[in-house]
Amino acid sequence: MRNIMELEQLLRQLHEYTKVEEYLMNHREIRNNKRLIQEFVATLNEEEAKEQLVPILPHMVSDTLNPPETFPESYFFNENDPLKVKITQHTRYSTPVMHKHDFYEMFYVYEGEFEQFIDNKTFVMRTGDICLVPPGVFHSLDVNNYSIVLNILIQKDSFQEIFFNNLSGDHIFSNFLISDVYAKKIDSFIIFPTNGDLKIKNMILDMFLETINKQKYYVQVVHSNLVLLFSHLLRHYEDRSIMPKPQRKRDVIDFEIITSIEKNYKDITLEQLSDSIHYSTQHISLRIKQLTGESFTKFVLRKRMTVAADLLKHTNMKIQDIGPDVGYKNQENFIRSFRKFYETTPSQFRKNHSKFKL
């Protein structure tokens, strides 16, 4: 039977310095010195080096000759793990690296304070503060002290699914989600100053333990806790949140359009969407094209295929049942659409990607 980490053990682990952190703390000359960093990294084992992100960084210090790095989703998320949320502790005293990534990242200051550079500004993040950064936004963290900072990484599709299915409405996330998922603004983020809210701390620690212990239904528990966390932030801290630009009415309408498609992709038509949003089909078609770069039909198809692929990879659901579940009444039409989209059949896709043995 696998050992289960308890809360007390996790808290002790968060406060203890790792071998790498102790070395960095006692050798401050390493910071921002590429040669010394490379020499230090050469002394680490593979797992320690991975925590320093060395395998995906051709250099550790960004400068004018070396542009900021992109951290790929595939490096952090295991394709065979149904949970697309990862929580880690940021390495103290490490060199800040200007970077971006193709997943969502949330920073939570469990204890202390650090500086974050984002949107050409420096923000001092203090105990309890939360910052949510979307894909494609350049930023860096400078934790040059004792502070405990937790990085919560959320795979892009999972993040969008959580929001579209559970957090529809007229709130700050409407502008944030639409602009970042579809318009891909390069300066977007949200900071919530929560002043050490104990409820938030407990929710994040609970999620951390779930990702470590992976007990029965851990995926559902983590996703549910994320919904509770974001709902709590909206309820209590929306008015205090920090964002680059104010929300516009059009962003709310765009959010409603995309949300309606995400929720009703199985059988929605452009006419039905037009009736529910109270805009012409021409206007909605134009907005979808401007937001996603795709037509209404292609956007719906992509949603159906993404869900079908996820069911093939992470469930033992029969293929003949997956077609109807994603909106296809005719099995042949489903197989034909899937094969055209992924250039392989559903059965072969499952054979190549599924962890289930049928």
Image (cartoon, grey):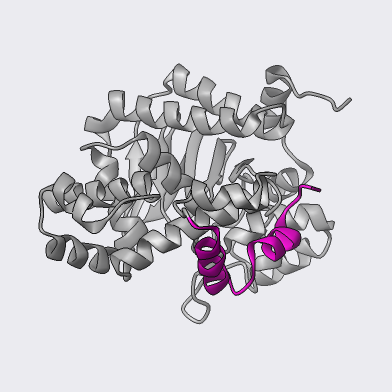
Q: Is residue 213 above or below residue 272?
A: above
Left or right: where 154 falls relative to 181: right
Q: In this view, does 296 lie above or below 145?
A: below
Q: Which of 204 and 58 is in front in this view?
A: 204
Q: Tell me residue 303's x, y (percent).
A: 43, 57
Bounds of the magenta segment:
330-358
Q: In this view, does 125 lie above or below 303?
A: above
Q: Tell me residue 182's x, y (percent).
A: 33, 61
Q: Which of 282 and 32 is in front in this view?
A: 282
Secondary structure mostly taken by the magenta-highlighted segment of the chain: helix
Which quadrant of the figure contains the N terminus? top right
At x 44% / y 62%, what residue is drawn? 302
Q: Tell me residue 72's x, y (percent).
A: 58, 63
Q: Nearer the viewer, residue 198 or 329?
A: 329
Q: Tell me residue 304's x, y (percent).
A: 46, 56
Would you say residue 300 is visible in this rendering?
yes
